[in-house]
Structure formats: structure tokens, C-alpha cells
Image (cartoon, rainbow, N blue to C red):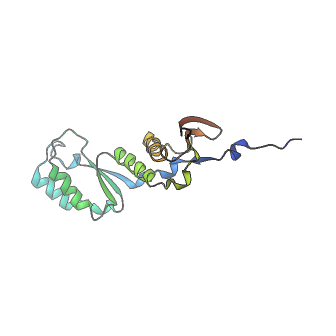
Amino acid sequence: MDAIVNKVAESGIMTIDLANYLPDMSSVVAFDIKPFLFREMILKEKDFRESMKSHDWEQYAGKYIAIHCSVDAIVPVWAYMLIASYMQPIAQSLYFGTASELYNKLVSDNISNIDTEEYVDKRVVLKGCGDKEVPATAYVSATEKLRPVVKSLMYGETCSTVPIYKQPIKK
């Protein structure tokens, strides 16, 4: 009787689960200027400065903060700067934009820190299914990071992959 051979295990394919590079969503917090505006549309400097002065900033300790305005209001740049000046000593980091945009930036930052040394001239699969939803941003960032070093890059599962890139044969 012939022995059962696991061809997938013997293929030398390395799998990367990009879910491992996702930040904790609870650490990403949106700071919307809207509630601090008069009638949620006009920034009155004196009132705005007073509300910033009395705001509880400690709730943002250690968090990644996305500063934005969810209404179509004219917000002067100094207002964002004032918020940043209160947040800076408390928050982990600040970002101008929505929480979703910040989340995608953090994903890309995490992937940019991958040490590619172990993937040089290897066949690599970016895992396509899992328990956590991985944004397209992660796959684009990982492709940008890995393509220059891998022998081939695929998407999906080791037993069923979609080819993305194959290093040209060197002559």
C-alpha cells in the first residue's frame, strides 16, 4: 500500500495570515468636531476654546485618534491644531480623517514592518479566508511589500490559490 503524501506540506509554500496585522479596533477612536459646533455647523471661537478646555481628554489615553468633522461645516485649521494640542500628550497617535481611514493606515503601517528576509525567493500565499475581515488595504500593502522579494505570490488557501505574481525566470 502506498503511503499518503501531503503535497501541500511538501510544496514549500509559506502562508501569511494578514489578520495577524490588524490593529485592535477598540484602540481606534473617532473624535468628531460636530458636537462642539454651534448648531452643529458653526465654530464660535470663544465657545469652542472653552469646550476644549473643559473636555475630558483622559478618555483617549493610549488610543489612536481620528480627528474629523462629520458635517459640512467650515472648520478653521487652527481648530484641528487645538484639538491635537490637547490630545498629543495623552493619545497614542493622531490622524486627520475618519476612524475607517485611520484603521486602514494602521493596517498598512503594521504590514510595512514585516521583515521580508524569510520570504526571499519563497512561494507565498496571502490567506484569503478567516475569522476576521481583512480589508483590501492589507492585501495591497502586503503585495507592495512582498512582490520585490518573493518567488511567487498567491491569494487564497494553500490547496486552492489564485496566482498574483511569479518572478521571471532569470537567464
Specify the quadrant of the image occupied by residue 124. Answer: top right
Q: Describe residue 131's horizontal placement relative to residue 22 as left or right.
A: right
| Residue most extreme to the front | 171
| Residue most extreme to the bottom | 89
Q: Which one is nearer the viewer's eye here, 83 or 4?
A: 4
Q: Which one is nearer the viewer's eye here, 62 or 37?
A: 62
Q: Which one is nearer the viewer's eye here, 143 or 160?
A: 143
Image coordinates of residue 21 in percent, x first then y, are 48, 51
Q: How many marks?
A: 0
Image coordinates of residue 6 in percent, x first then y, are 74, 44
Q: Residue at x 35, y 55 (%)?
A: 64
User: Where the N terminus falls, by quadrant?
Assistant: top right
User: Where the C terminus falls, by quadrant?
Assistant: top right
- Residue 37 sits above or below residue 54 on the image: above
Is residue 100 visible in the rendered image? The answer is yes
Is residue 56 visible in the rendered image? The answer is no
- Residue 150 sits above or below residue 56 on the image: above
Q: Residue at x 60, y 36 (%)?
A: 161
Image coordinates of residue 160 in percent, x first then y, are 63, 36
Image coordinates of residue 102 in percent, x first then y, are 35, 48
Q: Describe residue 74's horizontal placement relative to residue 142 as left or right.
A: left
| Residue most extreme to the top | 162
Q: Describe residue 21's horizontal placement relative to residue 56 as left or right.
A: right
Q: Residue at x 24, y 44 (%)?
A: 69
Q: Which one is nearer the viewer's eye here, 16 or 84?
A: 16
